[in-house]
Amino acid sequence: MGRQQHVRWASLKVAAMLYAGVTAVTLLPSTAAADDALVIARDIDINSLDPARGFCDTCQIYFSNVYETLVGLGKDNATLTPRLAASWEANADQSQFTFNLDPGAKFSDGSPVEAKDVKWTFERLKNIKGGAAFLMDPVTSVEAKDAQTVVVTLSGPNSEFLNIVSAPYAGIINSDVAAASGATAAADAETTDKAEAWFLANSAGSGPYVLANYKPDDELRFKANPEYKRTKVAISDIVIKHTKDAVTQAQLLESGNADIAMQIDPDTAKTLNTENLNVETIPSYNFLYVALAPGAKTAPKLSKEIRQAIGYALDYDGIIEFTVGGQGTKTPAPIPNGFPGTSGLPEPKQDLEKAKELLAKAGVPDGFEIDSEFPNMNSYGVDLSLLSQKIQQDLSKVGIKVNLTPVEFSVWRDHVRGDGIPLTVSFYAPDYYGSAQYVQFFGMMEGTPWFNRAGGKNDPSIANPATAELLKKALASAGEEQEKAYHELALGMIEDRIIIPVVSPNLVLASSKKVTGLRYSACCNLLMDELALQ
Amino acid sequence: MAENLALPGVRRREWPKWLKLPVLIGFGIIGFWVLVCLSVDFWPIDNPIDMVARRLQPPSFDHWFGTDALGRDVLSRTLHGARFSLMMSCAVIIFAVLIGSTIGAIAGYVGGFVDGALMRLVDVTLSFPPILLAMAVTAALGPGLENAAVAMIIVWWPIYARLMRGQVLSVKSREHVEAAVAAGASHSRTLLKHILPLSWSPILINATMDFGQVVLLTASLSFIGLGASPPTPEWGSMISEGAIHFYQWWICAGPGIAILSVVLGFNFLGDGLRDLLDPRSK
Amino acid sequence: MTAPLLEVRDLGIAIGALDVVRGVDLSLGRGKTLGLVGESGCGKSITMLAIMGLLSEHVRVTGSIRLSGDELVGKPQSALAELRGKRMAMIFQDPMTSLNPVMTVGEQLGEAIAIHQPRMKRQARQARALDLLRLVAIPFPDRRLLQYPHELSGGMRQRVMIAIAMANDPELLIADEPTTALDVTVQAQIMELLQRLQAERHMGMLLISHDLGVVGDIADEVAIMYAGRICERGSVDAVFDSPHHPYTHGLLASLPQIDRTVGKLASIPGALPSLASRPQGCRFHPRCFHAQETCRREEPQLRPVASGAVAACHFAEIAVPSRKAEEVA
Amino acid sequence: MTRYIVRRLLSLPLLLLGIVSLAFLISHATQGDPLASIVSERQMDNPEVVAAAKARWGLDKSLPEQYFIYIRNLLSGDLGTSFRTKQPVAQDLLERLPATLELVIAAMLLGSTTGIVLGVLAARFRDRVIDHAARLWALIGSSTPVFWSGLIFLYIFSVVLGWLPGPGRLDARATPPEGLTGFLTIDALLIGDMGLFWDALHHLMLPALVLGWTVMGIVSRLVRASMLDVLSQDYITAARARGAGEVRVLLNHALRNALVPTLTIIGFTFAYLITGAVLTEAIFSWTGIGSYAVDAARSLDYPAIMGVTIVGGAAFLLTNLATDIAYAFADPRIRLS
């Protein structure tokens, strides 16, 4: 740039500023930039906006609203409803599914949603091997019979497959647009796909909204997708504002700066001035659990008796009182209450006598020391540090001394997977409606994450031989029989006491009175197209 | 003399009162906390990690500073917290001084390439803003009070190394040292017997003045979540726990005032010390 | 008869309980030069600061200081500030430390003008500053305006100080040892300049010095100060030719002269007493070769002596042989 | 003078290399496995996935190799890609820089003006009540942990009194203008939106106050000391002797000289400001480099940690250099020698 130009540019800026000053004075009474977007306050924990890579709560919300799944979940959080697939049928043993796509469905660029997009999306989800790739584990092939028909073949019977494809991570991507931006579904996609950065700035779905803007640690902005016709979208602009803590979320809501606050904990909810707010506390499908790892490197002896003793030593009511101010429910098994197989499970109870008795029987009447690391974070309104300290106190009553170390979540993940952590706490939220995912995550059988974390490789004795068979049975059956299989699986997991769920925190749905249609969905967390402003 | 009496309003006294008062206050505050550290076990207060009352209770007669989210007594936790803050700062300062002055003494005494290399390391370390360096180190080593201490030693040693090197350089050329070398004293003997005793005082003074800063940085690291682990009643992590329960202001108040008073105490001492040693203000 | 330009009566200066200066009387007419002579620490500089009103509020000033009949003691600082630099100006001992190091010569000169002639235009001020520099005979004055004090030589700096003092044509110029900090070769030039300016502008000049030689050369009258008091005062001729106070005598005797090579104050043993340990009686008696019992008890007052001067010595008439007589002998 | 600057500039690249190397060493001395923050839990046992991830993030190479690759990329302005945001670290830092600068500059302005005023008053009225009060206030300022004063101020001004807004840079409903300087107050003026300007200013006030307080403590202490020094100089008496009034003496003569040594501590203050900014941003949800650093440290996002430490170190180094040069320029005695 020449000097002359430079000077001119500088004087231009000065002029602009002067102009700004003058107009500012004349416009003084005007209010802040009018922006009638609906504002949602929540902690944005996005790890990716690529459906094949992202795996987090905010991602779940984002994918549900920007991409459409083949099958949806009804308002009862149990029935499946048509979405991209107008209809579907399964073969007799539930190992092959045929989806007939809605011919009217269009992506945000106006092109129709076709079978090839479904095939591409599912293959990419599987091949990128990202966070939600496990959803595609049962799938052996996806075939586009014609533009409107997709046939998915599974490796075995799976009665939960329809629930799986209702998970937001299985939302269908516009394959042409994405492929043009470096995305690929090929077998080596995990190394050759270059589209992750593109997905941070663009969306290619058929959902009610499209991505308007994403600024990490700041905001995630949506705007209505004009091509979306399935439901009536009432609000054209929605922004999720990154708001880390519950107190700030509450403040934003109270001051009218936010319309919905998603992570207000029950303690904070009590302090809310509810004059202009709707505050509803409902049971959630999320739960927090204590996990024991008998096979961890530094673990003391953790026989089944000792594990059960620990189960009896915990003060479940106290935990709920302490962590969520009483706003939570007990969860007997590591499957959320209300999911298949959970009705009629025995409620956990504290019984110190029995705990001591079991410890004596196991040869450790005076207790022992055990190391515990926990992720230093707040999940679903529960401060894990608080929870761990409460557990530390409870166990001290039966002579078990817990040495606590808080670590960052990523470190915790690394440790829990590596040498294992003898005693820890963690949390789980459903990816879709269905009980199999819990068995596949918590069950004591070869290959599940918690079997590995609990040290199943060092101590194969913790395996529960019945699990694999029962799961197979559950997946191949339906109705009563399926319910019974899951029930038995749940009882088995309670008996194992590797995973001891301690609290299912209630969810606080807080919004301004203007907002209607706010509800909690088991698959998708928040469905924005149902929202409206009065 | 006449110039000193000129108008600017600068009155000079032989031993100004203000110079002594802050030092006394500083001694008082630090003395109190040291006493707390030594005797807190015998105080009639609750156990700092036991849940002794209902949670989140505002200050009352039974719990002067209220209770926290786990129903623990904030006063008791604050008093017990003194141990962690003061002991940790002590350890950090001692190790930083030992390591720093050893390296500085060697650099200053040996000179040449060793000096150059060590001093470049000092320069580079001092080029980092302390908190970023401490954060990077604790993040790498993993959170925890011990690792935070290591991080802070890494942050602080270069300061003493530089100081000690300067001292050694200035003392080294004095006559009695040169005489000792001429008389055939070994290097280690010369360094230990003739040089170090003369080089200590500025380092000690600096260490006192840095104490408050170490307390602050420890608490900061804990506040970010890179320091002490629960249920340790460490002030920084107490404030960070309190920040979650923002409306229950009393959870933060105790540890906050504690940090403020300790740092203030050391700053008072440091200020007094500086005034004493600065010939200008006498 | 009009009031003298400067009249100091019974001036006392005290800091807390300490008397720094007591009972000082001075008088200076227009166009005249008064030399105030004494060792460092005798109170001459503080006397001068008192006249300028530059003492800190912690210092107590009593007595009377009149500038053309206008009483200065007790005047508020703001009123004094208006007089300073306009009707009375001052030159300091060390031109290096008394010029602001971060301001150019031009800025400082300009300031001196602007303070008292705020309405003068920038350009007029510039021209005036240039005139002033020419007045004090600084070579390349226009270049000097943009220079900083440390870029100038010592003599040049003192010329700048003098130019600043002359900025508003003061009636009274106080020069506090204006040549002490300068090279011997420059000293004479500066004194010459001062003398010339004084004559041209008809100013009264109060010259403070510990150097009797300089004072003898240019002053009309001289006052000798010792330990906060005046011990002898009179016309230069009277005091120099026949000193009546032993201290004056000692000072004169220590003057380096062509025929004598004696060290400074060689003829006066001992040293000036400190503020806190001033002796009873005559303050000079511990060093006086002629001290008697009376001297230890009673403080002598100024009284007229044969030469026409006044001296504060119990034995003014007999104690000191006439200087001339000594020389003859 | 020129030689001094040249010498300082020549040592700069060497120090920068030192900074980069040390930062690299520290972040690779880690105990945690960085893969844990990239690869998803269920895939960690799949060696293919792990190998692919290692290859993708360059973690399969030996340490020296990684080091040279890092240096090479650094020279082309590439600080690597953040594990957490999945964006280039350089881009993340650039996006957040204006927020931090706006906060730090506001705090610096606030802190140094109040600090200078307090320092001048304290020196002028040495040993009087005003001196003691100013010194105590400054001392408290530099002794209070910002993360605590931040919370207390938020509680008082935002919750109890409701005078100022809570955390954040703008109201949640306001949209910041895009593509301008990134300084919200300036941008708002540029587009002539007074409402937005007040909003940004209101949000800026508390954090700037909290951060500025610590600066004020340091500045006022130093200004007081150097004012005392300057006020006893001959040229102050000389200025009075030419009739300069009290204000002129204090500001034109004394302060002008006293500020020269004060300049030297700007570099020193910068270290405090960064420490303060990290904590202040964390409390006030200020999307700047400070909160980025905290998030990076918490999630073991090594590229980001390294980026922040390197950029912070380089900024610190440059500030020190700049203040040293500025110091030399401010004092004509040094400038012209």
Image (cartoon, helix red, strand yellow):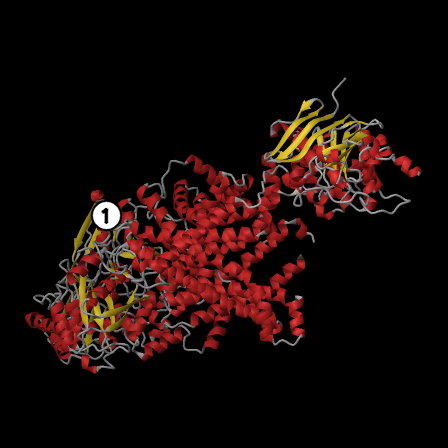
Residue C26 seen in the current view = yes
Q: Residue C305: which quarter of the image?
A: top right
Question: Residue A44 or C214: which is nearer the viewer?
Answer: C214
In percent of width and height, residue A266 lies at 21, 53
> Counting other residues with Cα less than 10 Å from the Cα at mark 1, is it few (<14), some (14-19), or many (20 or more)?
few
Taking the image as shown, residue C182 lies to the left or right of residue A497, namely right
Q: Nearer the viewer, residue D263 or A129?
A: D263
Q: Quadrant of the N terminus of chain B?
A: top right
Residue sitting at the far top: C1
Q: Position of residue A252 (x, y in %)?
A: 29, 48
Task: Give the left or right position of residue B30, taking residue C32 as reference.
Answer: left
Determine which quarter of the picture holds residue C45.
Answer: top right
**Residue most toward the left?**
A480
Q: Which residue is mark 1?
A: A271
Q: In the displayed structure, would residue C96 be above or below residue D86?
A: above
Front residue (pair D123, C321): C321
Q: Quadrant of residue A139?
A: bottom left
Residue B186: x %, y % from top left: 61, 76
Is A63 drawn above or below residue A448 in the view shown?
above
